Image (tube, rainbow, N blue to C red):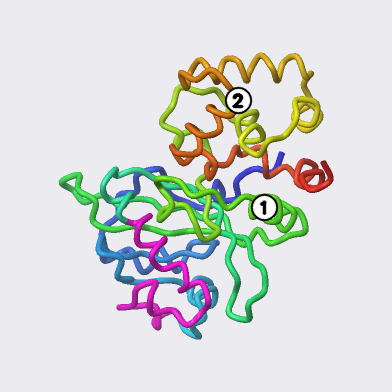
Amino acid sequence: MLKSPISHCPGPDHAHAVPENLPRLVNCMPCYAAYKRPDSVFVCGNLAYARVVGLARAEDVIGRTAYDMPARSAECAPLSHAQDVKVVAAAKTLDLLGLHPDASGAFKAYWYRKTPVLTSTGEVGGILTSGFDLTSAAMFELARFLFKIPIKTEGKLLLDNGSYLVGLSHAQLPITRREHEVLFFLLRRKRAQTIADMLGITPRTVYKYASVLRDKFAVRTSAELRDVASERGLVHILPPRLFDPRICADLNRR
C-alpha cells in the first residue's frame, strides 16, 4: 500500500510555532507549504507552493487568499475557505486528496494536510498547509472512478470540486477500517464479488460487513444504507487503501 507522503513532512497534528520562525520553517519544509491566518489570508509560503498556485516567487503569496491565485485551483477557493473554517473551529488536522487542474488545465493530484497552529494560550492562530504532488496513472484512474458519481451531500461545499477527505477520523462514526473500505464500494453500487476481489476477501465476508454497517446506520436495506451514508458525506471520505496502485488499476475495469 502507498503510504501518505505527508508523513514525511514535519509537523504533528497540532503544530506549535513562534510566529517569527514560521517563514523559515515553511521555507525549509521538503514539500509544498504555506501558512495562513485564521481568516485564510496567507502570511508566507515557499517557492514550491507559489508555483503550484501559479506565482513566480514565494513572496508573491503574502497577503493573498485562495481567491487571488492565478492558477485554476482558484476555482476551488470557496472549498478551501470552508476547509479552513473547519480546521479553525475544530482545531483538528484535515488530510485531503485534491484533484484539480494546474495553471495549464492539466490533471493534477495532490495529497495535502491542513494543520491548526496553536498559540501559547491554546487558540488556533493560523493554518499550516503542506502537500505533495501525487499525479500518476494510478491517481488518474482513481479520479475517473470518483467522478462517475457526483453525489450531493449536506457537506457539499466542503467536499465537492474534486476534494476528498482521507481516513476514518473524518467519518465521525464507530466503523472499522475494513467496514469503511466495504462501505466505499457499496456506495458505488459494486457487487459483493467485485468488492471481495478488490479487497482480497470472500463475498461472504462482504455480506457480513454490509450487515454490520446496516446495523450501525440503523437501516434495513442496502438502498437505505447508501442514502443515509451519502447524506452524511461519507461518499467523499476515502479509505487510505485506495491509494494502493494495484487497486487503482482495477477500479474502472469492474
Part of the protein shown in magenta? 58-84
Mark 2 — residue?
222
Which of the two discs, 2 and 1, sits closer to the camera?
2
- Crowd around label 2: few <14 · some 14–19 · many ≥20 (10 Å): some
Q: Quadrant of the N terminus?
A: top right
Residue furthest to the bottom: 56
Determine the image quadrant of residue 209: top right
Residue 155 shown in magenta:
no
In x, y percent, where is residue 65? 34, 73
Camera-side residue of 227 and 27: 227
Identified at 38% across, 67% down, the residue is: 24
In x, y percent, where is residue 106? 67, 74
Camera-side residue of 241 and 45: 241
Mark 1 — residue?
148
Residue 79 shown in magenta:
yes
Which labelled disc corresponds to residue 10? none
Determine the image quadrant of residue 105: bottom right
Identify the secondary structure beneath mark 1. loop
Residue type highlighted by circle 2 = Ser
Q: Earlier in the sequence, mark 2 or mark 1?
A: 1
